[in-house]
Amino acid sequence: MKAHHKEVSPTHNRSWKKVVALLALGLQKIISKVMETEVEPKASQEIKEHKEDNLPPIDFGRPVEETPILPLADSVPRRKKVKGGFERVPAQLNSRFLLSQNNLMASSKDIKLMSVDLDRIDKLSNAAFAYMAILVVAICYWSYFHNPDPRFLWLGGTLSVLATLIFIRTFHIKRTSAEVLRVDFFRHSGLVTFPIGNNVSTFSLALDEVDLYIGKVSAGRGVLFNMAYLVPKRYPKHLRHQPMYPVDWEPRDLEDSMELWSEIHRFMDNTQPIPASFYKGWQEVIESSDFTEQDKIIILGEDLVKLAPFYDLENDRPLDKVIW
């Protein structure tokens, strides 16, 4: 008689099946969490849109305060030239014009240029791969405990090294950069203040020590758009990386950037009144329903709010006022 043997999978095959099953379960949970964090806030944001009571308070990320100019002895000149198709924007102070669009966040004391570092956000998102690798490592070590197959150790060790490198990289990015960048132009002192790292400190330079550049930047899939950057001519000695600072407007061309850069220079000249092109932006803040009264004071300052109105938005003309 032939002996009938019941077919049984080897032990290591059963372990690998458990690994795959646990890995699939872990990935499913991670994806569900990501979907919750992305979809729910977006839906709630649409519901809360244009409701003044639900708007979050204005947060500039760090205090808006003047700091002393960076001493020459504690600074080093910019090491690298700005290349890659970037063009320096000159300031034409002899021409006079009224900007049709002035979206600068300004008061009568300072200009705040803010932007979001999308490249930083993309780099930090790589941490998700590190967390997934840790999950697989835990499964590998658990499997090795039940079945001492050296493949589990090899895979777990490799993924541990990969996760460690990603975490080191993301920690460095978090420490040396900020998601929200803000450069301040102070009219009274004539200084421009730049953030260091993740807004841990600042350094200030005179306006003539700051250049503005524009250049084409890729948005992916062959789409190009103009981007403007503020570039200090010197940096603190202890800064290993000398960053360029993106600004919060997308210039149409060199002429568009030249007009706005020239108006910033006129704003910083405290021997003359503030250019009338700033009045429109102030009035738009005053009449906006997207800001609370407290937000308007935070943006413009209490003294400037009391001086409103500044601009006739209906007829698109500045009022006969002189603001210093």
Image: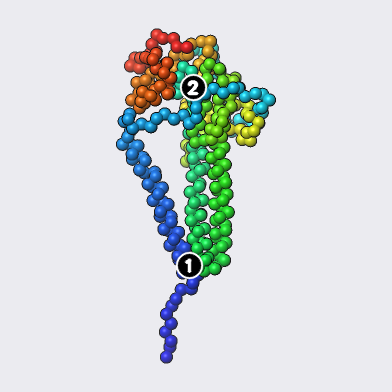
Quarter holding the N terminus?
bottom left
In the rendered image, the residue lying farthest to the bottom is 1
Dot 2 crowding, Cα within 10 Å, few <14, some 14–19, many 20+ = many
- Label 1 belongs to which residue? 15
The amino acid at mark 1 is Ser
- Label 2 belongs to which residue? 111
Is 120 left or right of 321, judged from the image as shown?
A: right
Q: Nearer the viewer, residue 109 or 277?
A: 109
In the rendered image, the residue lying farthest to the right is 73
Q: Nearer the viewer, residue 87 or 110?
A: 110
Q: Is residue 73 above or below residue 241?
A: above
User: Circle 2 sits in a helix, a strand or a loop, which is it?
Assistant: strand
Q: Is residue 39 above or below residue 157?
A: above
Q: Quadrant of residue 4?
A: bottom left
Give the distance between the C-alpha atoms of the residues marked 2 and 1, in whole angstroms. Answer: 62 Å
The amino acid at mark 2 is Ile
